[in-house]
Image (cartoon, rainbow, N blue to C red):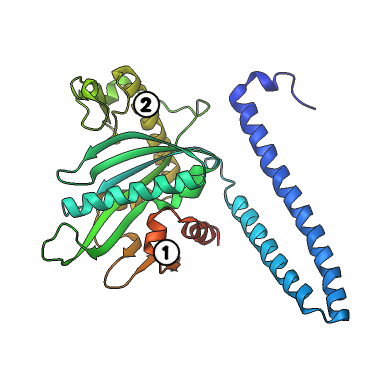
Amino acid sequence: MLDPNFWQDKLNSQKVTKEKKFYEDLINSFQDSNLKLKDLDDLNDLANEENNQNIKNEIIDSVKDLKAIVKKNEIKCFLSNEVDVFDCYVEIHAGAGGTESQDWADMLRRMYLKWSDKKKFKSQLISEHRGDEAGVKSSTIKIKGDYVFGWLKKESGIHRLVRISPFDSGARRHTSFASVWVYPVVNENINIEILDRDLRVDTYRSSGAGGQHVNTTDSAVRITHIPSKIVVQCQNERSQHKNKETCMNMLKARLYDFEIKKKEKETEVNETLKSEIGWGHQIRSYVLQPYRLVKDNRTNFESSDPQKVLDGEIDDFLENSLFNLNG
């Protein structure tokens, strides 16, 4: 029986309702697939009796469709951790290499934004520090949608690009690196204690788009959490107060993510990933020249169409990471 006070706790009721729909959709899909499979089995018997190849071909196509549905539902089951349902922040930092790496960081940001658009998720630019000539030195975006953190959580790590540089007059091949850091947007139900004495708050003038007003006021905010050395920043609002509020939410999310990683005994590895943007600890390579290939170093999944991947079609990589994570 439903608790009379259930609907008064808005956040909890939303969470439970969302979980209920998740499991109902899974059960309904399973039952529907079972019925379709039984019908196809009967149809296959008929096709064999009549030796009808056209019907057999239709059955093969239908089975492929059913397999795709089963795979989709299997992936949904892998997105069952408490934090998987959350929205997420995607933080990107260019590695050493100046303009080359900064352009690569911008390409990665575009890839995730394109992926978000294809999923019909909502994205928001939180902060960016433009490169001197092109690209970005660093940028943070927020993506909102169903199970976004669950989908993107394994994207944290070093991404490597090999290409003929558009910035090199000698048309030489360059290798660039950028780090990606994905962490969940936590809700009000999660209690993270943050003491004022542990914070250093700096304000500065925004350097990104936003018009003259943004660029002539100290509206951007940077907060450093001294004990953990975590730094967050926001400049997307004209109001310093709103930017500070966003920074505090990001800091809460980062600290929560830090605790999760510590519990999973991954903190040491992840801190190394973030601090050492170089040849080691790469999770994926994107090669545009001399051949064309994108390869995930953890799952060995690869694609021979880098442009497609950079245009946001990364579901195959994300799915293989999830299977590998839970395998």
Q: Quadrant of the C terminus?
A: bottom right
On residue 153, the disc is none
Q: Nearer the viewer, residue 106 or 180?
A: 106
Which numbered mark, 1 or 2, is in the foreground of this view? 2
**114 sits left or right of 161 in the view:** right
Residue depicted at x 83% and y 64%: 39
Does residue 264 appear anywhere in the picture? no
Closer to the chain start, of discs 1 and 2, is 2
Q: Nearer the viewer, residue 298 or 229?
A: 298
**21 sits left or right of 282 in the view:** right
Q: Amino acid at mark 1?
A: Arg
Residue 252: percent from left, percent from top: 40, 30
**139 sits left or right of 10 in the view:** left
Residue 70: percent from left, percent from top: 67, 59
Up the image or down, 294 lies above or below 24; here it is below
Q: Quadrant of the N terminus?
A: top right
Residue depicted at x 66% and y 33%: 16
Up the image or down, 209 lies above or below 325; here it is above
On residue 298, the disc is 1
Does residue 73 appear anywhere in the picture? yes
Give the spatial CA distance, label 1 vs label 2.
33 Å
Residue 278: percent from left, percent from top: 23, 58
Up the image or down, 174 lies above or below 73; here it is below
Q: Amino acid at mark 2?
A: Thr
Residue depicted at x 41% and y 34%: 253
Mark 1 is surrounded, within 10 Å at the Cα level, by few (under 14), some (14 to 19) or many (20 or more) other residues, namely few
Residue 138: percent from left, percent from top: 26, 42
Residue 71: name its quadrant. bottom right
On residue 246, the disc is 2
Residue depicted at x 19% and y 47%: 134
